[in-house]
Amino acid sequence: MQKIEFYRHNIGKKEIQAVSKVLKSIFLTTGSVTEEFEKKFADYLQVRHVLGLTSATAGLFLLIKAMDIKEGDEVITTPLSFVSAANCILHCGAKCVFVDVDKNTGNIDIDLIKQKITDRTKAILPVHLYGVMNDMKRMKAIADKYNLKIIEDSAHCIEGEIDGIKPGQISDGAAFSFYATKNITSGEGGLVATNNDELADKIRILRLHGMSLDAAQRYTKKFTQYDVLVPGYKYNMFDIQAALLLTQLERIDKMWEQKKEIFKYYYEKLKDINGISYPSVPENVKHSLHLFTIWVDPEKRDEIIVKLQEKGIGVAVNFKPIHLFKYYREKLGYKHGMFPEAVRIGASTISLPFYAKLKKKEIDYIAKVLKDII
Ligand SMILES: *Cc1c(COP(=O)(O)O)cnc(C)c1O
């Protein structure tokens, strides 16, 4: 039977060579390779600061922390996402306030944000679902009016833009992920991008125990005592990770072009199957092409997933809405009837295999199988 993985990474000779080079050097932790990657990523995004971390979750957590958001505060976010951001809001002691999503894109419904703003609201935390950016200009107008911060969960969106704006450019900060299935990957990894100097300084300190000097500074310069300025965390990206990412970053636009072809081919192949619809991509958006997601009849969705898997096709569900998880229902009082659009999409959605190495004949097979099932 044919086997089509849900995801295949793009790590090859160049990455293996780059990692070998680091392994043969003396310095394995956060040093010059991490610094070079941060600089290149900042150039790519055209933002002032990039801070390499162990995950996007670390980035979201540190952004919320660095903004001094804490118990008694509220953060507005979407229920239709991975649980990471919502958990981070809770870790900081704040209240996680969900707002339903737009029925066409699955991104947070900006029209519904205002009615959830209270005098305790400190930030809005949008997620660029599947790689389609939220309307940052409109969100920024609301944030400015109510004096709120914006934290972007950009785990799906490295290459994306809206109105020419990239993640991290007009918000207070964006967190990116290099988890195993993301557009470029080091297995685990992440970063924060921001144009806010003060936040960048705070996160630089918080990511490494709150120390005033990192290991590279202590190692390469004349001996100086470091100080501890705050009780920080241990979230620093290190050179082995950065080596893997640097060479992928060089190819990221090329891989994006390949995925654009695949995206188009999928649409072509699936277009005459009744009963499939798609999240929409607004005209002013450059899609980062992270996930290829279809929406099917929620009554039949699980059955379709099982049959796809039986035919050797890897799939994922992005996402079961967060407010339906046990902890969020039982401890935070969220209920089944809430956020109907997020629930509808969460019950209809199937993400199909989608990566630069996916072959046209594999898509032909997926299309044929889907047609037979539906
Ligand atoms: C992958 C993902 C995360 C978490 O990324 P990590 O690097 O694993 O912490 C957060 N949000 C979304 C939307 C994701 O898909």
Image: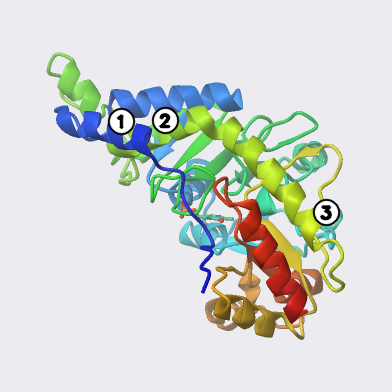
Q: Is residue 80 visible?
A: no
228 up-or-down from 55: above or below: above
Q: Alpha-carbon distance for marks 3 and 1?
A: 39 Å
- Tell me which amino acid carries mark 1: Ala
Residue closest to the eye, 96 or 32: 32
- Earlier residue among tags 2 and 1: 1
The x and y percentages for residue 181 are 49, 54
- Earlier residue among tags 3 and 2: 2
Q: Residues within 10 Å of mark 2 (few under 14, many from 20)?
A: many
Which residue does the numbered mark 3 point to in the structure image? 280
Q: Total of numbered circles in the picture?
A: 3
Say what secondary structure mark 1 lies in.
helix
Q: Give the left or right position of residue 120, taking residue 110 as reference.
A: left
Q: Give the left or right position of residue 248, taking residue 209 as reference.
A: right
Q: Would you say the residues marked 2 and 1 are in contact, meaning their CB atoms lie under 8 Å apart?
A: yes
Which residue does the numbered mark 2 point to in the structure image? 246
- Tell me which amino acid carries mark 2: Leu
Seen at 54% across and 21% down, the residue is 43
Q: Would you say the residues marked 3 and 1 are in contact, meaning their CB atoms lie under 8 Å apart?
A: no
Which residue does the numbered mark 1 point to in the structure image? 18
The x and y percentages for residue 268 are 81, 54
Seen at 51% across and 48% down, the residue is 60
Say what secondary structure mark 3 lies in.
loop
2 up-or-down from 169: above or below: below
The x and y percentages for residue 179 are 45, 51
Where, by quadrant of the figure, is residue 256 drawn? top right
